[in-house]
Image (cartoon, grey):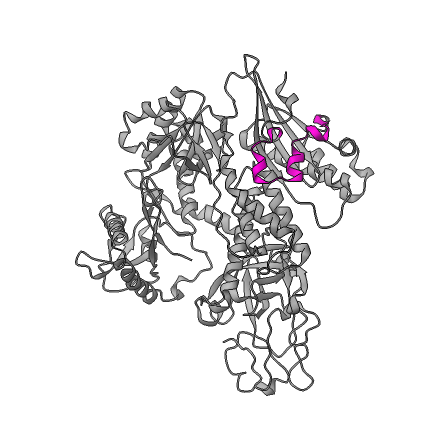
Amino acid sequence: MLHDGMHPISIATHHARAYDEDTTITTSQDHVVLATAQINVRSENGYCLQLRALLDSGSQASFITEFAAQQLHLKRRRLQVPVTGIGCTNAAVSSGLVEFDVSSICDPGFNIGCTALVLPRLSQQLPGARLDPTLFTDLLNLNLADPRFYEPGPIDVILGADIYGHLLCGELKFCAATAIELNELVKALCAFNACEDGESSSKLTLDEIYCENFFERTTRRTGSGRYIVRYPFKPSADLSVLADTKYDAEKLYHYQNKRLNNDISFKTLYDEFMSEYLQLGYMQPVCEDFEPQPVCYIPHHGVYKGSSSTTKLRTVLTHHVKRNVWRWHKIAFMADIEKCFRQILVDHKDADMQRIFWKDEHGQPCLYRLLTVTYGLNCSPYLTIKVLHTLAIDEGTEFPEAADVLKECFYVDDCFSGASSVDKAVELQQQLQTLLQCGGFTLRKWNSNSGDFLQKIQGTNANKICALNSDQDTKALGIYWSCQDDYIGYKVKVSVVSVAITKRQQLSDVAKIYDPACLLAPIIITGKRMCQDLWRTGCTWDDPIPEPYQSEWIKFRDEMPLLENVKIPRWLFTADDIEEAQLHVFCDASSAAVAYLRVTQLNGEIKVSIIMAKTKVAPLKKRTIPCLELNGAVLASTLTCKILETLQLKSTHTWYWCDSKTVISWIRSNPGQHKQYVANRIAKIQELTNVDAWRYVPTKCNPADVASRGIYPSQLEGVSIWWAGPTWLQKD
């Protein structure tokens, strides 16, 4: 039981109260008791703590203290968000975003995931002074979430409106629209930051280690070669106390039927999809009269995708590339595995954990159990990748090249690979098809920049070829590939806004630019820098942003569709018989770096291609220009390591270019001669790079300067130094 405002005399509003040190929770005569709870908090690494939480339905987000985050060893994503309290005062700035599980000390079956911002501290002790427990004699015999609520204690977690409904009644009541929108915006921003992040961690958490070991112990194969897997439930989860899901699933089934009856074309597609699901043996009717334990019923709904060339409708069931050398190959191809998840069988021990309601041949409600891995579960991509990697190991001795592609060049069920010639590409395609068929998988929807390749493979796979329309682009890992012209490009959808631009809208616009290689860095840095400027102004989420930012951003977003004019050659002009390949990395102040591959062909012709870039806005704390230039050099060092690891360019000569002679002299010096800030960065650069490979470049010849300054979308296409580097790089 939760307790909120238990004293009948006074009423308190606690929105943002936890952030305001000047706000008291007591009066001279009466006490107001805020809603607190003792909760168990568990990190994905397996660390557990019992903490005291404040329930704040007026908070737009959840929070955790720096102390608790460190004690739990929570994995943190960098995110600086100003927190505003009463009177629109800036109370603090978050240092990151973390995720953890919250469980009840009263109900062992209650567990919920929580995403929270990290703050140095949240509140003074609550209550402010010890209360007389005899004032609450009617409540002390109840099973309270915080049995000693009358004792002052620290607050390490604030549970905001995003999960407040869960704690009150076990389900989320979608009444806090602002909190939900903010949560989605924060997630979009984190995804935007993640796709720009050049560093990745390979260290497994305790949960990940458990999943790996569990998969190895429980996975087996049928006589035909298909894989049977178990679902990796948490070892601490007691499935016998799983909440009853049958009623909700049945209720949603009837609601779904009403919705389908209002859209006959959609209903036809849905019926055909489910009928195929049953005919192919992906699900079976439940014939038993008794209900096993544990059991879980899951709702389902349809997602219509008109742009799909094969599956227009996909049914989603709702449950709470190591490297890509695609640009390296002269002949590139892509394909995907047909109905990939459904080719992996689920052990009968877990099949009842994915029951659904659907109708029988007479149109009456009927229970079914799903027999294959289900699209929509958070573990489905992991199980799919593990099965494909296991298939590569099990059958790899017979198909070594295809096994390498299966392990290195697949993104879940999508294949991105190629070869140096049409004949080698065809041979690799045939190996891939044969290898995957050993596990019950089939590759389809082949696309390539080579018409000869498509013609040669079409003879034996005519029904599996999705011939490319020369007027249509193919989506590849979030970007668009024009196979006929062999270039990659972007599509940006900007919503029409009839009112003044707010900070929320501006941040949402920036997060919509998906650019994993950061080739649009000069554009992205302009948006990120304005984000930072808006934080400085102190304007709130939904207030119109002030001038001149309002006019500048309207101009920027009006030009965003022009990014579709940007055409970047996919192929890096690499081949087996090139004379030399060099990697040139340029950096500039405010943390900007861009890398180019310079290839000298046997005929002496030189080709320069942009590979990847990375930008960061300058820190809010003022730094000297040399220190900012040094940060750019660090960024260039980490970017280079990422590129060398991804493209495996170990024998390639690498050169680093900086327009600060001071930084170059620092890099070649002893780190111990400098202050800690400079010394730490010099040490990292010396660890990651060859100091003798650093060279000086004038600012006017430095393409990283374009990314450092930032430009508008209409200007990007014509900036030749950004796409091909300085002119002298293309000379012998």
Residue 422 point in image, percent of width and height: 39, 21
Residue 659 within the magenta-colored segment of the rendering = no
Tell me where the magenta segment starts and ends, as one range.
693-721
Residue 370 point in image, percent of width and height: 30, 53
Locate residue 520: give its quadrant.
Answer: top right
Count of numbered badges drawn on the protein: 0
Locate residue 287: give its quadrant.
Answer: bottom left
Residue 708 within the magenta-colored segment of the rendering = yes
Residue at the image position 55 percent from the left and 68 percent from the top? 39
Apparent side of residue 210 relative to residue 709 in the rendered image (left or right): left
- Please name whichever residue, 682 or 214, is drawn nearer the observer in this view of the structure: 682
Quarter of the image with the C terminus in it: top right
- Please name whichever residue, 80 or 355, is drawn nearer the observer in this view of the structure: 80
In the image, farthest residue toward the top: 603
Q: Would residue 511 be seen by someone viewing this image from the given angle?
A: yes
- Please name whichever residue, 85 or 393, is drawn nearer the observer in this view of the structure: 85
Residue at the image position 35 percent from the left and 60 percent from the top? 296
